Amino acid sequence: MDRSAEGANHQGCIGYAVDFSYTDLDGIFAVAEKRGEKPFIVVLDGIEDPHNFGSILRSCECGGVHGVVIGKNRQVPVNDTVIKVAEGAAEYVAVARVVNINDAIRELKTRNVWVYALDMGGSDMYKTDLSGATALVVGAEGAGVSTLTEKLCDGVVSVPMFGKINSLNAGVAASLAIYRKVECDRAERAGTVK
């Protein structure tokens, strides 16, 4: 064990792991189809903090999201920190790593998925119907959703702010939007006003 641990303090146990296995958009749609649900996807536009990414993955798993789309560039990959912060969610949420998220958004729209950017200056998300096949685009820390990406979206929704600070951490904002979407889907199934 000492030789395998290469000098690290192994405390009598050594674990071996393989690289994270990404999927593609078809894989995410397959998850939705298997569950008999309309696709619910989160697209990350340049999240660079692994803690935010891990937190978002955890919220996605708890909120029933079918998959997350990330870009190969300007985006933290699924790494050890992301997996640790996700607290097991990385094992259950499909993550598609694409060359260009704008192309992925275009494809989602051709598959009848409504795409909403989560950014400041949009419609109050609590007054927006997010039911049905939906993708939520979460922008980078500080920069938000990029201009071109936002233009590709069907709409922009915002978390209403009531304090002196005008923005939330990307992971927190994503979690609130995910659960707003869950609320809309429940209302749609119940036939009640959203």
Image: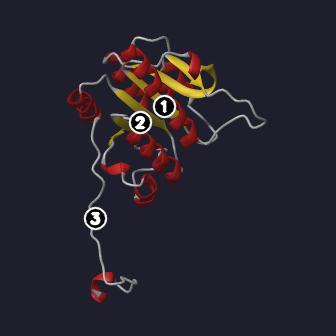
The answer to which quarter of the image holds residue 33 is top left
What percent of the width, then of the height, locates residue 66?
33, 34
Instruction: Find numbered disc 3 in the image and state the secondary structure of the residue it sits on.
Output: loop
- Point out the residue furthest to the right here: 164
Q: Circle 1 sits on which residue? A: 179
Question: Tag 1, which secondary structure?
Answer: helix
Label 1 close to label 2 by CB (< 8 Å): yes
Mark 2 vs 3, N-terminal side: 3
Question: Is residue 180 toward the left or the right of residue 1 in the image?
Answer: right
The residue at 29%/46% (across/down) is: 22
* Disc 2, SS: loop
Choose between 177 and 28: the one closer to the eye. 177
Which residue corresponds to the image point at 75% horizontal and 38% vertical from the top-left? 165
- Identify which amino acid the numbered label 2 is placed on: Gly
What's the CA distance linking mark 1 and mark 3? 32 Å
Choose mark 1 or mark 3, whichever is in front. 1
* Quadrant of the drawing holding the N terminus: bottom left
Q: How is the image coloured?
A: secondary structure
Q: Eyeballing the image, is 113 above or below 58?
A: above
- Tell me which corner region of the image, top left, top right, bottom left or bottom right, holds residue 106: top left
Q: Amino acid at mark 3?
A: Ala
Earlier-in-chain disc, 1 versus 2: 2
Q: Which residue is mark 3?
A: 17
Label number found at residue 122: none
- Measured Cα–Cα span from mark 2 to mark 3: 27 Å
Q: How many marks?
A: 3
Is residue 47 shown above or below 66? below
The residue to which callout 2 is attached is 63
Residue at 52% over, 25% down = 117
Pointer 1 local density, CA inside 10 Å: few below 14, some 14–19, many at least 20: some
Tell me the kind of residue under disc 1: Tyr
